[in-house]
Image: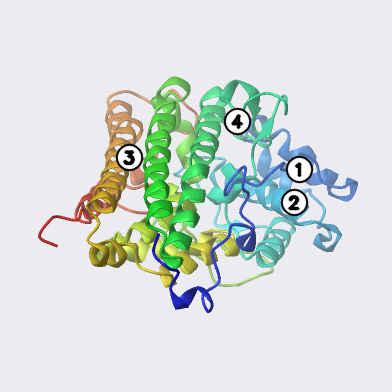
Amino acid sequence: MEPPSQNVKTTPLLSLERFHISEDYGFLLPNPLKELPDHFRPWMEIANKLPHLIESQQLQAQVNKMPLLNCQLLQSYREQRLAHLVLSLMTMGYIWQRGETHPQKVLPRNLALPLVEVSRNLGLPPILVHSDLVLTNWTPRNPERPMEIGNLDIIVSFPGGESLRGFILVTVLVEKAAVPGIKALVQGVNAILQRNQNSLFQALQQLRLSIQDITRTLGQMHDYVDPDIFYAVIRIFLSGWKDNPAMPVGLIYEGVSTEPLQYSGGSAAQSTVLHAFDEFLGIRHSKESADFLHRMREYMPPSHKAFIEEIHSGPSLRDHILSSANGQLRTAYNQCVEALADLRSYHIAVVTKYLITAATKAKGRRPNSLLGPSQALEERGTGGTVVLRFLKSVRDKTLEAVLHQSD
């Protein structure tokens, strides 16, 4: 092993703990709360009935009668995360209760004020984000048993039934599958700082295995999520009010702003996992894609965004491998890049099935759902991107990172 370089003394080693990332659960919130203190019972009573209230078109009336509650009585971080989940899901139901053609343009102050206050406390936007729907919205049925879909439940729901449960919980399991990769990434950064080639090689091997496991786990979508239900029922409640033709000017948050505010809907791009992998592997996306991805970082918990930025400002893995002229490291690096491109190709296939093909089928028949399919959004992801063009660009730029012998 080579002697450690001088910069070990000046550059602190990377750790997950510093960024409030769990060694066991990664970016998932460990042991999310299922209940808020008694003061917040009016919120929880509505949250626990959201699917029924939305489907029967009673949610707006229930929210309009809701008291304005004091958010300062939310004491712990976990309480604030559950409050953000509850308030943001209530907001999605309130806006889209009558479907895409009749969105509510104003969020009432008794919902808008607490949502904005909790959002500011957490450093999150006042809309449903990935850290709500997925990272905070899971609970084990039996904590002693393995973390698999049959042993998990979601905490707060909306229309979509078993397909919604499957969509959320498969995504929870994708985040869990990423944990060994996140730990390998930390090991890899520290191995570069310490000039430990053997540790770096092991880290790259572990990262590749984790990426491959993520791809396999994502495949469970086909077992648990019906494409027609995802397209016609679930998607609308993930849709935001930025780059959305159904709400071109945005949403007025009553008591917060007299002007409409614009926020993107939920998106897989709000997961920190692939951002971290891209930064570590030195993947460089097109300006259009990179601009969108960087905007999605504003929709992550601030400590997770800071983790990505720490990797970005750390030592360059690509430069280290090129300067080391170590063929074993180059091969291990390329295998990680190819596994990541394979994951992105697989994601394209999933999105094609659940969005493009489902949209075509929905056009060919009268919608049997009260809400109907989201016509104006059918080529866009819920985050507001023209989805396939974006995903293919991101995949192709990933493949461009492969190191050739001539590099």
Q: Mark 3 points at which residue?
A: 343
Numbered circles on residues, count? 4
Q: What element carries label 3?
A: helix
x and y percent of residue 182 in the render?
Answer: 49, 50
The three-letter amino acid code for the residue at tag 1 is: Leu
Q: What element carries label 1?
A: loop
Residue shown at the point (42%, 42%) measured from the top left: 206
Of the residues under marks 2 and 3, which one precedes in the sequence?
A: 2
Quadrant (top left/top right/bottom left/bottom right) for the N terminus = bottom left
Instruction: Say the numbered circle drawn on residue 55.
Output: 4
Q: Name the residue under label 2.
A: 78
Would residue 17 be found to the left or right of residue 200 on screen? right
Label 3 environment density (alpha carbons within 10 Å; few <14, some 14–19, many ≥20)? many
The three-letter amino acid code for the residue at tag 4 is: Glu
**Closest to the observer, 58 or 126:** 126
Q: Mark 1 points at which residue?
A: 33
